[in-house]
Image: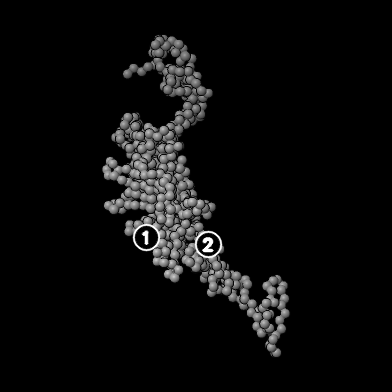
Amino acid sequence: MAGTFQKFTADYNLMTPEDMDMLLFAPFQLALGEETVERLRIQFENYEYYDGKQHRNANGELVKATELEQPPDLDYMPTRYATNYFKAIINRKARWQMGGKHNVVVPRKQIDDPIEALKPNYVPSPEQAKADEIAEGYEKLLHQLWHENKMRAKLLQAARDRLIADRVVCKIAFNPNTGKLRWIFRPDTEFIPVFSDDDFEELIACHFIRQKIVDVDGEEKEAIQKQTFTLEGEGVNRQCYIEEAVYLAEDLSLFEQIQPKSPMGLDFIPVVMFPVNDLLGEADSQSEVADLREQNDILNQMNEDAIDSLKFEMFPMTAILDAPEGTAEKLRIAPGAVLEARGDRDGRGPSIKKVESGFSWKEAFKDQYMRVKAAMHEISGLPQIVPQELNFGGLNGDALQVLFHDIISDTEEHWIAWEYGLQELHEKSVKYLQARLGEPNFAYDKDIVRQIEDYTTEIKFVLPLPDNRKELVELLGEEMANRLESQAGAMRRLGVEDVKAKQQEILNEQSQQMNRLNPYGNVNDMQAEPQGENSLPLTQKVQEAQERSDGGQLVDASGEPVEICPVCQGSGQILDQTSGEYKICDNCRGDGLVQIRKR
């Protein structure tokens, strides 16, 4: 929504009471209600303040510094400019919340006995394998949705809106042309919720409103575009309906019907709220925004006064005493300028001098400025130093945690609300997709979407601190060595998206390395000819025994049953680990064959 709410002052000499009521109580504001109008007014002011409108004109409206006029009680135009440290703090705090590379994890449901699952020869049951497959598919689906909706950028933007307006909302929409699900984040200035009287947190209806200009018989008029979601019915018959239309602002008459009221096939409203509530008793809290604005106003005033003081010091007032009238008009302010002045009275000469002030207030100003700036950091929780300025060494992870303790605690508190909201967003998104399985265009795996019944997800938030992955890897390594953590669990804590694929990749690399380093060839095929540049050939006796083999049974020259030596694998030689050279196998004495042991 664009625009602001204005307060009109009526003149009874020019306006009738009816005209005054029309101005003071417009139909649109009456429809919104006093509480909503006041909330929107505060939110609009916060957005304007964030954009740099940090001064008020004679009418009390927030304006840019360049839009101010000279006060009538001053003989000069005072300096006016916006420091906008308020915007810098909002941006930094949003980056703390959403600057890290967050990840979504679907926990695997444990169906089999956990003790049996720890055994080396454990094979998952069909039920366990099916549950793991569904969880893995659900996780891939969420990663696809995050990627398609550019969530890293969207969350950073939404975090700013949430801090400014104390709430941000996300609409879930399905595009039938592409078959994809969209997550549409909108500012709270467009959102009007309706909660149940029985449960004040249950959303039973909501409206999204935006102001626009429409053409009515060649005349431009203000209009309101309204999209409404409502829950109607009870129990299994509960249904969400959607309606969208454009209304004229002057009388709220219908101008255009975009979408008539129709069912969506959902038993919930496809909207998720991400509020900021510091207290249980606050429905729409102001959090620290109002306090930050107050401190930022003081900074602006101090900077403006300092600039004006500097101007007066650089260009001090010139005093002309006992000189004829009009002498000041002849004075030129320029390098090397010369002024001739004669006294207008006998016995008294003219006097021309500069009235100097001096910067005796510099230290006091600096101290006060730092106190106000520190107060803004104290309110927001941000440290005086930002991570980007830590371009020196010597700080480990523990020191960083202490240095940024306040903002880390504040960020984790905000993450709680974000996690609950994102979990609700994931659940509603999957249910939305399940209701659209009959669509001809569907960009997701229908089998996986159809099978999802457990919508539990976990959000792995990451702080935007310098990378301490090395310390985390060392910690996980110690836990795995002491049997306090599994490899799969360590990978999940490190943020690995597909743990199974990563484990298989590691296993394949280990197998390849073992095959390259094994001088005896493939240990799984004893009867095959050794292959590979690092493999040793079979002995002559082994080759002759293979030629005499009857039905796969090897026999020596005397006809005794034999088998390939399990130590040297038929090569008759083994690698000496000390010298690194090959020596005669002690088990077969270099023959490559041993007699079959009788059991």
**Measuring 46% from the left and 59% from the top, which residue is drawn there?**
4
Where's the C terminus, which quadrant?
A: top left
Helix or strand or loop: what does disc 2 sit on? loop
Along the line of sight, the residue nearer the viewer: 84 or 390: 84
When asked about the image quadrant of residue 164, the answer is: bottom left
Tell which tag, 1 or 2, sits nearer the viewer.
1
Q: Among all residues in the image, which is located at the extreme bottom? A: 346
* Residue 566 in view (yes/no): yes
Using the image, determine if residue 471 lies above or below residue 58: above
Along the line of sight, the residue nearer the viewer: 378 or 52: 52
Q: Are marks 1 and 2 in contact (CB under 8 Å)?
A: no
Mark 1 or 2, nearer chain start: 1
* Residue 468 in view (yes/no): no
**Measuring 30% from the left and 51% from the top, which residue is drawn there?**
196
Classify 10 Å Cα crowding around label 1: few (below 14), some (14-19), many (20 and above). few
When asked about the image quadrant of residue 111, the answer is: top left
Q: CA distance from mark 1 to mark 2?
A: 28 Å
Helix or strand or loop: what does disc 1 sit on? helix
Identify the amino acid type marked 2.
Lys
The image shows residue 408 at horizontal and vertical percentages of: 42, 53
Along the line of sight, the residue nearer the viewer: 188 or 466: 188
Using the image, determine if residue 479 lies above or below residue 322: above
The number of discs equals: 2
The image shows residue 310 at horizontal and vertical percentages of: 59, 70
Rendered image: mark on residue 64: 2
The image shows residue 244 at horizontal and vertical percentages of: 40, 47
Along the line of sight, the residue nearer the viewer: 109 or 83: 83
Using the image, determine if residue 443 lies above or below residue 363: above
Identify the amino acid type marked 1.
Glu
In the rendered structure, the answer to whether residue 260 lies left or right of residue 296 reads: left
**Residue tagged 1:** 34
How is the rendered protein coloured? one colour
